[in-house]
Amino acid sequence: VGCGSAATQAGDPGWILGVSLQFGLAITALAYATAHISGGQINCAVTFALVLAKQKSVAQGLVNLVSQLVGSVLGAALLLAATAGGEGARDRTHTLGANTLSPTYSVGNAFVSEMLMTALLVYVVFETAVNNKSTARHNAPLAIGGAVFLAHMVNISITGCSINPTRSFGPAVVASLNGAEGLWQHHWIFWVAPLTGAGIVSLLRG
């Protein structure tokens, strides 16, 4: 949903706000829908933090990671099918909303922003969904979706906003297979920075 909104709205007036809302609301809805099944494990950085904090087993974490990667690739493939070919059908990002480094920012800028915004998300997850003293409990998805929205408002102009390595992986794979170039040059940022931010929060709050 989030990448789809980027692919169809990029460049429109207010598109950053619109895409940020799409990502935040999508995560809110999916967290409500899947929390009772898998704990709402959509983001592998969150999964990594929960494994470090011993809230999830390593085996469960690996199963979640594989599922997240497969889902990301399948989602990107469906987005390609929805935007490729036909009169007026087009992907405005030309990369299925894949994460890339903006030419106006440095690698350091991207690393710090991705690390901090992922840390924000993971902190909110720990304090609303994991902490037994949380007053949010069943409404934790609202806070989590809000954190995702805030992160996108900050990071879209810098990296397109990853804060989730598996969200970055699928569009990069499918867009590259479809002919897009340069998507892997800085792809490591979208793994190392989010996992670093998640790990720091897990060690401090887990």
Image: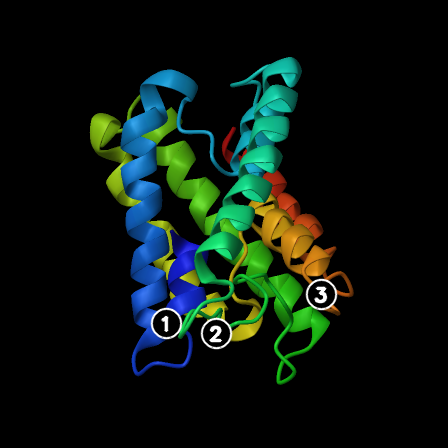
Residue at (62%, 63%) from the top-left corner? Answer: 112
Whole-number angstrom distance, CA of label 2 to CA of label 1: 7 Å
Label 2 crowd bin: few (<14), some (14–19), many (20+), radius 10 Å: some
Is residue 108 or residue 80 the one in the foreground?
Answer: 80
Residue 169 pos. (x, y %): 64, 48
Whole-number angstrom distance, CA of label 3 to CA of label 2: 15 Å
Query: Is 82 displayed left or right of 17 in the figure?
Result: right
Residue 98 visible? The answer is yes
Q: Amino acid at mark 1?
A: Gln
Residue at (37%, 72%) from the top-left corner? Answer: 9
Residue 62 pos. (x, y %): 65, 22
Q: Which residue is mark 3?
A: 179
Secondary structure beneath disc 1?
A: helix
Location of residue 39 with respect to 170 vertically, above or below: above
Q: How many marks?
A: 3
Q: Which residue is mark 2?
A: 92
Secondary structure beneath disc 2?
A: loop
Label 3 crowd bin: few (<14), some (14–19), many (20+), radius 10 Å: few
Secondary structure beneath disc 3?
A: loop
| Marker disc for residue 9 | 1
